[in-house]
Image (cartoon, grey):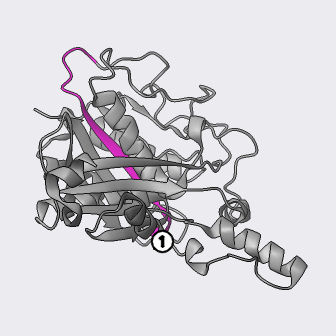
Amino acid sequence: EDAIARYGRDRVAVVIGTSTSGISEGERAIEYARAEGKLPTGFDMRKQELGSAGEALARYLNVEGPALSVSTACSSGAHALAMARRLIQSGIVDAVVAGGADSLCRLTVNGFHALSAYATGICNPFSRNRDGTMIGEGAALFLMESRESEVALYGTGASTDAHSMTAPEPSGTGVEHAIRQALGDAGLTTAQVDYVHLHGTGTLHNDPVESDVVSRLFGIDIPSSSSKGQLGHTLGAAGAMGAAHCWLSAHSSNPDRYLPPHIWDGAAEPGMLSEALVPVGMKLGAHAKGMFLSNAIAFGGNNVALVLGRAA
């Protein structure tokens, strides 16, 4: 309401990243149809359209700017934030409600099982005992505005290495390109980044590639963590939730400057990040400015990096 009052309804946009949208609604409808021979009363196919997320939120908020949905698998939420920033920079709008949202559905759980990428227990990123990811659900939304705020999105970068539909390019070239692009956009060097929020899915292939890229660019001591040990992989929401961890770390509501902890079994694998993984209670150094990088690495080699930090 404050943004509408400041800018007008037509100057507020919505950009939402999602990979499942309302597919669970379709799954339930199919079950009903198989049992009853017809779709349930009131079922609307638009509920499971990927584009419905942005439209539905815009209608709920009663805003009249562009309403967009982004679906690039696990980088969707990060892409949404980057797109929102571009909408503001271009002058098309003055504010954007942006982020990602995904709900649990059988399609994704069965898909990860089929790929042998689903953990038998708890997701254990960067551990030598990791055996896959676990699916979570959630949402993270931001109100991005043209006016200055306490925490800013300084830079964005994206790449598509197209190496495989499901595995990252082994050398991490695409991931590195996205990170370098984001740093260049933010006007920062690697030495000016204080913390990296890792995509860290706990899968056999993703973790080594990301570990190699982060170590190569920032050194083996850069404080890093993945939140998937606590939250699971929230798919289309993951990129926005990673940005939210960085935002919360940078904001004044965290006066002690605690960093997001990395929850795992502590069983390091040689050659991967281990000493840099943030333990519970670790704080940002007193002299650190508070610049954070968040990675999102998706199927199809779709990579996004975001740089957030406290406004100067």
Horizontal and vertical percent position of residue 77? 41, 56
Q: Quadrant of residue 58?
A: bottom left
- Depicted 21 relative to depicted 213: above or below: below
Q: Is residue 213 in view from this perspective?
A: no
Secondary structure type for disc 1? helix
Instruction: State whether residue 22 is above or below residue 125.
Output: below
Q: Residue 51's spot in the image, x, y percent? A: 45, 73
As drawn, the residue found furthest toward the bottom would be 37
Magenta-drawn segment:
285-300
Which residue matches tag 1?
52
Q: Residue at x 18, y 60 (%)?
A: 8
The front one of 103 and 158 is 103
- Give the left or right position of residue 240, taking residue 262 as reference: left
Residue at screen point 68% across, 61% down: 105
**Which residue is nearer to you in this view: 253 or 245?**
253
**Which residue appears at 35% of the width and 31% of the height?**
248
Picture layout, residue 257 above or below residue 38: above
Viewer-closest of 46 and 296: 46
Q: What is the quadrant of the C terminus in the image? A: top left
Q: Nearer the viewer, residue 9 or 114?
A: 9
Amino acid type at mark 1: Ser
Q: Position of residue 65 (x, y in %)?
A: 25, 68
Q: Mark 1: give few (<14), some (14-19) or many (20+) Cα within 10 Å.
A: some
